[in-house]
Amino acid sequence: MNCKAQMMKKCCNFFTQENRFNTSGILKFRMIYFNGIGVFLMSAILFSCAKENKSDKKYLTENVIIVVMDGPRYSETWGDSTHQYIPRMANDMAQKGGIHTSFYNEGVTYTMPGHTAITTGIYQEINNGGGEMPLSPSIFQTWRKFTNNPAVDTQIIASKDKLEVLSNCIDPSWRDLYQPYTDCGVNGLGTGYRKDSITFLNTMNALVVDKPKLLLVNFRAPDSNGHNNDWEGYLQAIKDVDQYIFELFNFIEQDAYYKDKTTFFVTNDHGRHLDTVADGFKSHGDSCEGCKHINLFSYGPDFNTDVIYSTRRDLLDISATIEELLYFPEKRSTGNLMEELLLER
Ligand SMILES: [Zn+2]
Ligand SMILES: [Zn+2]
C-alpha cells in the first residue's frame, strides 16, 4: 500500500470510531472537532505524500537531444589529443559534460544499423539503403505512446533521406503508430541527401518554434566526403559539424525552455577503416577498430561535468539511459544505463 492509501485508511478509521458515539451533544462536538483535525491531518498528509512523490523523481531531464556526426573516426575527433578538428566541442563543451574514450558501435558499422541501434536499443542487420524499417519500435514511438504527446514533440531531422525509416517499425503492434515528425533529406525518403547547413537551419528552427522534447539530428558530410576520398573535405566537414553542434548546444544552454532540463548527447553511427585496413578512411562497414570505435559526449542536468570516462560502452546504452532519465514505463532497449554519467543526489 502506498503512502497516500495508508494515510487515507488511518483517517477513515479515525472518523468511523468517532461516529460510533455521536448520540450525545458532547460527542457530536467532539466529532466536529476531531473531523476538523482529521481534515487538517489529511491535508497535511496528502501534501507530504505529494512532496514525497515529487522527490521520487530524481532526474531533472525533460528533453533529450541526440546529435549524430555521421562517420568520423575516433582518431580525427576525441582520439586526436590536439582536438584540432573539433575545437568547439573540446574547448567550449567538454568541461560542461563528459567524454567516453571507449565508446563503440558493437553491431554493423553502416549508417542505418548504427542509427537503428541508437533509436531502438537493438543491433539489427538492417538494409543500409533505407529499404527496410527497424524491427522494433524506437524510443520516439514508445515515448509518444507513454506521454500521449503530439508527433511534433518527437523529431528526426537528418541530412540523409533514408533515415526517415527510423520513424516506423515492422512490429505489427507498433507499425504506423506513435511516429515522430520527420524532416529527412531533400524532401523525405527517396529524394536524396541534402547539405548539413540546411539540416542545421531546420534544427534551429524546430528548436525555436516546435520545441521538440525528444530529437535526433544527423549531419552527413564527414561520411560523404570520406566516401569521395576527399581527405581535406572530410576534415573540414568534421570542423563544420563541430561548429553546428556547438551552436545547437549554445542554444540549449541559454533558451528558457531547454535550459537546465535538457540532456544532450553527441555521438556517431560508425567510424571508418583504419589506414591499414582496406581503402582506409574512404570506407567503413567491418569490425576493425577504426569502424567500431566512435564518440560519445554527454551533457545534462543529471550528468557529471568535466569528466573523461574509460568505461566501455556502446550505442545501445544511449537509449537505455534515455529510458531511465525520462521514466519510460516500458523499457525496450537491450543496452545498459550509463550509471557513471549520473550525478549523485
Ligand atoms: Zn558511409
Ligand atoms: Zn573498418
Image (cartoon, helix red, strand yellow):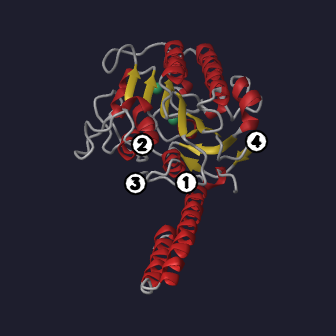
Mark before the other along the chain sequence, 2 or 1: 2
| CA separation in Å, label 3 and label 2 | 10 Å
Q: Nearer the viewer, residue 95 or 53?
A: 53
Horizontal and vertical percent for residue 289?
Answer: 57, 40
Residue tagged 3: 330
Q: Say whether residue 317 is visible.
A: yes
Q: Secondary structure at mark 2?
A: helix
Kind of residue at disc 3: Glu
Is the residue indicated by label 4 positioned so its CB lies within 8 Å of ligand 2?
Answer: no
In the figure, is residue 188 to the left or right of 37? left
Q: Which residue is mark 4?
A: 306
Compared with 281, 236 (above or below) is above
Q: Which mark is residue 139?
A: 2
Q: Position of residue 161 (x, y in %)?
A: 38, 21
SS at mark 1 in the image:
loop
Q: Amino acid at mark 4?
A: Asp
Q: Residues within 10 Å of mark 4 (few under 14, many from 20)?
A: some
Task: Determine contact: label 1, label 4, CB under 8 Å.
Answer: no
What amino acid type is highlighted by mark number 1?
A: Leu
Q: Quadrant of the C terminus?
A: bottom right
User: Which of the two discs, 2 and 4, labels the residue nearer the N terminus?
Assistant: 2
Q: Using the image, determine if residue 152 lies above or below residue 44.
A: above
Secondary structure found at label 4: loop
- Judging by the rendered image, the residue that carries numbered circle 1 is 337
Numbered disc total: 4
298 above or below 182? below
Is the Cβ of the residue at disc 2 closer than 8 Å to that at disc 4? no
**Residue type (three-letter) at the residue carrying disc 2:** Ile
